[in-house]
Image (cartoon, rainbow, N blue to C red):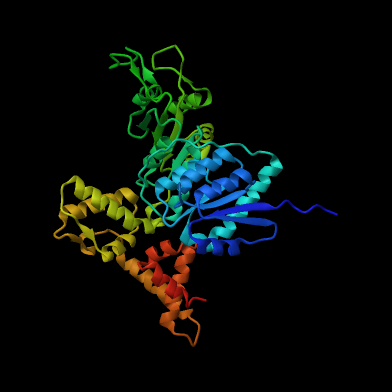
């Protein structure tokens, strides 16, 4: 007779007793023991005396918060996985929690749609780890600080990756269109890493002539070339112990790529005009708006260097792929610009936000910031309206596409139903699907309150 599989233990920690009742019923399964606590102190006592596979805990706890509970669990029971939940987790909370070893960070509004799936996947991961015997402690790291604006699922996934890769020294390749904030992500990786007490040195590979780039990277000796009137340290030497961010790495000439590859392989380099070999302890983060695989195929980028740099890839979504972030970004830029220039408070109307969200944003976040700055400079009142944003999209084509899509949707309505009510509920359902089940993000995308979206859902099949 075969042995029964070992029982798995899940601990739910939340001050909301109604949530605990719901989650217990929602997650109930054969072979799963579910424990419950409403304080962080009680939860830590449970983990101390009972083997727990997975903890799902709120950020908002007493007598200490979920972040502190995560840190203490990682010290007390490194094999226990932790998922943190919050109504509206901040950028710093997501990155720091992931950096400290959280398995995931979830918004409470998305729990009805994704909690079961994520809990099952986490417990399966635990089972795989036990089978492989590979449970290793991951001690919490000190705090870092970063300011990145965004609540979209796409950007929050980036935050989680930042938290994970920051703990290592692995090279990171950040990809994305111009203006998406690649340098800001690089700074976040550095600030949350063990190297944060050393410098992060930045070099734009596309902004320096080829004959000077080698000297910028590795330094030079006095007299090594015309104009070299003194010995000069290069960026690798300046970044020793810290991080070197190579922006627009796709523009680096092939002759310099060879020398960069050597540093990545063994950490050694020489100044221009010198025979001695220097060594540098530097973490490399590179960024490009180009598709490096295509550059390799075209012979403009070395394949071996590409694989050295592309140990971890972070793809930053374009602004048009995270429209729900536009209201927050617009307000952030608005406050920063008016404060910097000593201007009176300016508000932005809902109609103007809708206009911004309908734009394609080829220049991404940088274009949005410049657009807000221009509107502030030319504003004739304290409220910004759509006319204050002369965006360059092609409204005629957009309107035709919208009309055609609306016609198709109306024609697909079932016969004998209230077409207007059906259209409203169908739109609500599709918005939630596009937001991966995130009610708040779907409501923002539609420009309505979450409560109104829930009312529409009541009629959705």
Q: Residue furthest left?
A: 380
Q: Residue furthest bottom?
A: 416
The picture places residue 220, in percent across and down from the top left corner, at 36, 17
- The answer to which of 371 and 400 lies nearer the viewer is 371
Q: Is residue 446 left or right of residue 336?
A: right
Q: Residue furthest right?
A: 1
Q: Residue at x 22, y 63 (%)?
A: 385
Query: From where the camera sits, is residue 264 visible?
Result: yes
The picture places residue 99, in percent across and down from the top left corner, at 48, 41
- The answer to which of 144 and 67 lies nearer the viewer is 67
Q: Residue at x 38, y 59 (%)?
A: 324
- Which of the 4 image quarters holds residue 441? bottom left
Q: Is residue 349 above or below residue 373?
A: below
Q: Is residue 325 above or below residue 212?
A: below
Q: Which quadrant would the N terminus be assigned to in this image? A: bottom right
Query: From where the camera sits, is residue 103 visible?
Result: no
- The answer to which of 432 and 234 lies nearer the viewer is 432
The picture places residue 212, in percent across and down from the top left corner, at 34, 24
Q: Is residue 364 above or below residue 250?
A: below
- Which of the 4 image quarters holds residue 232? top left
Q: Is residue 263 left or right of residue 388?
A: right
The picture places residue 226, in percent across and down from the top left corner, at 29, 16
Q: Residue at x 46, y 24 (%)?
A: 281
- The answer to which of 35 and 176 lies nearer the viewer is 35
């Amino acid at each position: 007779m075969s042995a029964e599989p070992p029982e798995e233990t899940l601990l739910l920690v939340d001050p909301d007793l109604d949530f605990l009742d719901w989650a217990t019923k929602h997650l109930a399964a054969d072979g799963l023991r579910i424990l419950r606590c409403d304080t962080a102190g009680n939860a830590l006592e449970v983990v101390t005396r009972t083997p727990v596979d997975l903890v799902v805990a709120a950020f908002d706890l007493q007598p200490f918060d979920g972040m502190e509970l995560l840190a203490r669990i990682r010290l007390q029971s490194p094999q226990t996985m932790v998922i943190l939940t919050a109504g509206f987790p901040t950028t710093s909370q997501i990155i720091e929690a992931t950096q400290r070893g959280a398995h995931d960070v979830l918004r409470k509004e998305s729990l009805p749609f994704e909690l079961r799936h994520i809990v099952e996947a986490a417990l399966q991961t635990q089972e795989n780890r036990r089978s492989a015997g590979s449970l290793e402690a991951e001690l919490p790291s000190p705090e870092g600080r970063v300011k990145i604006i965004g609540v979209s699922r796409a950007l929050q996934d980036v935050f989680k990756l930042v938290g994970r890769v920051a703990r290592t020294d692995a090279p990171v390749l950040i990809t994305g269109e111009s203006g998406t904030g690649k340098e800001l992500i690089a700074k976040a990786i550095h600030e949350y890493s063990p190297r944060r007490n050393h410098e992060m040195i930045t070099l734009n590979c596309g902004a320096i002539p080829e004959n000077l780039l080698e000297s910028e990277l590795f330094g030079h000796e006095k007299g090594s070339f015309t104009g070299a009137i003194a010995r000069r340290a290069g960026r690798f030497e300046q970044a020793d112990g810290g991080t070197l961010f190579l922006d627009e790495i796709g523009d680096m000439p092939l002759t310099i790529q060879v020398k960069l590859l050597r540093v990545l392989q063994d950490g050694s380099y020489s100044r221009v005009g010198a025979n001695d070999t220097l060594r540098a302890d530097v973490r490399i983060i590179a960024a490009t708006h180009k598709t490096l695989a295509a550059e390799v195929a075209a012979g403009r980028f070395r394949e071996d260097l590409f694989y050295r740099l592309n140990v971890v890839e972070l793809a930053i979504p374009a602004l048009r792929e995270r429209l729900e972030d536009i209201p927050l970004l617009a307000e952030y830029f608005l406050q920063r610009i008016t404060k910097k220039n000593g201007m009176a408070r300016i508000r932005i109307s809902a109609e103007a936000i809708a206009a911004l969200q309908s734009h394609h944003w080829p220049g991404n976040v940088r274009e949005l910031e410049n657009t807000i700055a221009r509107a502030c400079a030319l504003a004739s009142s304290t409220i910004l309206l759509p006319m204050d944003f002369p965006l360059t999209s092609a409204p005629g084509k957009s309107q035709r596409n919208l009309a055609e899509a609306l016609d198709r949707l109306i024609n697909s309505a079932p016969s004998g139903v209230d077409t207007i009510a059906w259209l409203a509920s169908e739109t609500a359902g599709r918005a939630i699907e596009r937001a991966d089940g995130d009610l708040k993000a779907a409501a923002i995308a539609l420009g309505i309150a979450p409560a109104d979206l829930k009312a529409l859902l009541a009629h959705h099949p």
